[in-house]
């Protein structure tokens, strides 16, 4: 009797493969450039010209690793970021992962760390408290590098691949590479991690942080900045595990404590109802809950079911450590 082949599931026509694990995907979001502009106008600040969006976008959910990713994987260009960075809040003063990362760097005995995407130096300033650790910053913005140098930091206008080719011999080996909130903006996550791993010493480590998706309020309110052309990929525990497998590295994940169920519910309702947002506060949210009891109850139940990571509800950020595989 001849052996029968098992049927191979056909790819849905036209659906892109996951950029992390190459599995098939299904479409979960689709917006024209004009609709994306309307979202940004409503939630961020007025976008003067739809050409800054550049194209229509979809987002696809990987059926294997649950990465959500943009199609096409083409990030916003310089004009889009010039517009976005006019928001004073765009570059945070600090991030929770700065302390988490510096603790991990100390534990590893790191002497030199390279930051990819250093911006105007928020992490470099944080590391000034650790005078036994040398920090080098890289960025593709000439203004950001000029700003860092004016503050006295060792900063260079290049990406990590150019650093490896042009500067590594001169500046010496690095024990760790860090990059905060860059991965999700890039079209090729695997080459980004490999590029960082290529400059780190054999017993070194790479640290990246991103938002943890979905954000706690995202189901009800959406988040235009966690969508293209701003973010190309949305990450969670499973997609990071797939990324580690794809680059053949070990990984560990770290998340801060999430806000409480009530805080997440209140924050989501406040974002959802602009009248509450205008008069933010517990009393306003209580009035809102009384006015919209079904929505408030549904949101509370949704927050109670929030995904758990390491046994506790997922927060909105994640830090991941990549190290050499066990031999
Ligand atoms: Zn995948």
Image (cartoon, rainbow, N blue to C red):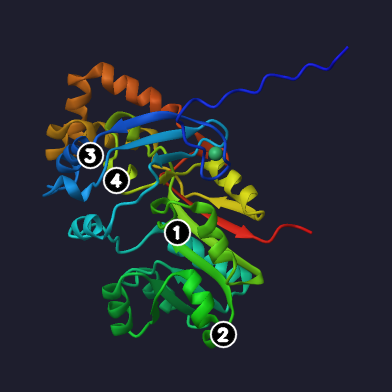
Q: Give the secondary structure at mark 2.
A: helix
Gap between marks 4 and 2 measured at Cα? 38 Å
Binning the other alpha carbons within 10 Å of mark 4 as few (below 14), some (14 to 19) or many (20 upward) gives: some
What residue lies at 48% left-to-right and 52% top-to-bottom?
A: 188
What residue lies at 18% left-to-right and 26% top-to-bottom?
A: 288
Label count reads 4
Dot label at residue 97? 1
| Horizontal side, residue 46 vs residue 159: left or right | left
What residue lies at 24% left-to-right and 18% top-to-bottom?
A: 293
* Front residue of this view, candidates 284 and 148: 148
Gap between marks 4 and 1 measured at Cα? 20 Å
Residue under pointer 2: 169
Residue under pointer 3: 33
Binning the other alpha carbons within 10 Å of mark 1 as few (below 14), some (14 to 19) or many (20 upward) gives: many
What residue lies at 34% left-to-right and 51% top-to-bottom?
A: 75
Residue 280 in the image, given as x and y percentages of width and height: 17, 40
Q: Along the polypeptide, which appears first: circle 4 or circle 3?
A: 3
Quarter of the render that holds ligand 1: top right
Q: Along the polypeptide, which appears first: circle 2 or circle 3?
A: 3
- Contact (CB < 8 A) between labels 2 and 3? no
6 vs 253: above or below: above
Gap between marks 2 and 3 measured at Cα? 44 Å
Residue under pointer 4: 225
């Amino acid at each position: 009797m001849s052996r029968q082949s098992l049927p191979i599931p056909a790819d849905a026509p036209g659906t892109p493969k996951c950029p992390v694990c190459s599995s098939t995907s299904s479409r979960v979001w689709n917006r024209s450039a004009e609709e994306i502009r309307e979202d940004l106008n409503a939630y961020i600040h007025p976008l003067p010209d739809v050409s800054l969006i550049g194209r229509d976008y979809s987002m696809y959910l990987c059926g294997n690793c649950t990465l959500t990713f943009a199609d096409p994987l083409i990030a916003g260009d310089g004009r889009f970021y010039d517009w976005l960075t006019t928001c004073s809040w765009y570059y945070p003063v600090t991030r929770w992962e700065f302390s988490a990362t510096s603790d991990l760097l100390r534990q590893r005995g790191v002497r030199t760390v390279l930051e990819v995407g250093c911006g105007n130096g928020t992490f470099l300033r944080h590391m000034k408290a650790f005078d036994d650790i040398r920090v080098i910053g890289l960025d593709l913005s000439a203004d950001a590098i000029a700003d860092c140098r004016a503050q006295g930091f060792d900063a260079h206008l290049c990406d990590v691949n150019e650093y490896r080719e042009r500067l590594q011999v001169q500046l010496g080996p690095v024990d760790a590479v860090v990059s905060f909130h860059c991965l999700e903006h890039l079209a090729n996550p695997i080459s980004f991690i490999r590029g960082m791993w290529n400059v780190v010493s054999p017993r070194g480590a790479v640290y990246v942080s991103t938002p943890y998706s979905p954000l706690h309020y995202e189901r009800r309110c959406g988040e235009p900045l966690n969508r293209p052309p701003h973010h190309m990929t949305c990450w969670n525990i499973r997609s990071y595990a797939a990324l580690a497998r794809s680059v053949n590295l070990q990984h560990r994940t770290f998340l801060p404590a999430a806000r409480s169920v009530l805080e997440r519910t209140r924050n989501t309702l406040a974002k959802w109802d602009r009248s509450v947002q205008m008069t933010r506060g517990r009393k306003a949210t209580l009035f809102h809950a009384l006015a919209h009891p079904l929505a408030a109850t549904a949101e509370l139940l949704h927050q109670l079911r929030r995904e758990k990571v390491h046994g506790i509800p997922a927060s909105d950020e994640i830090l991941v450590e990549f190290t050499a595989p066990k031999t």
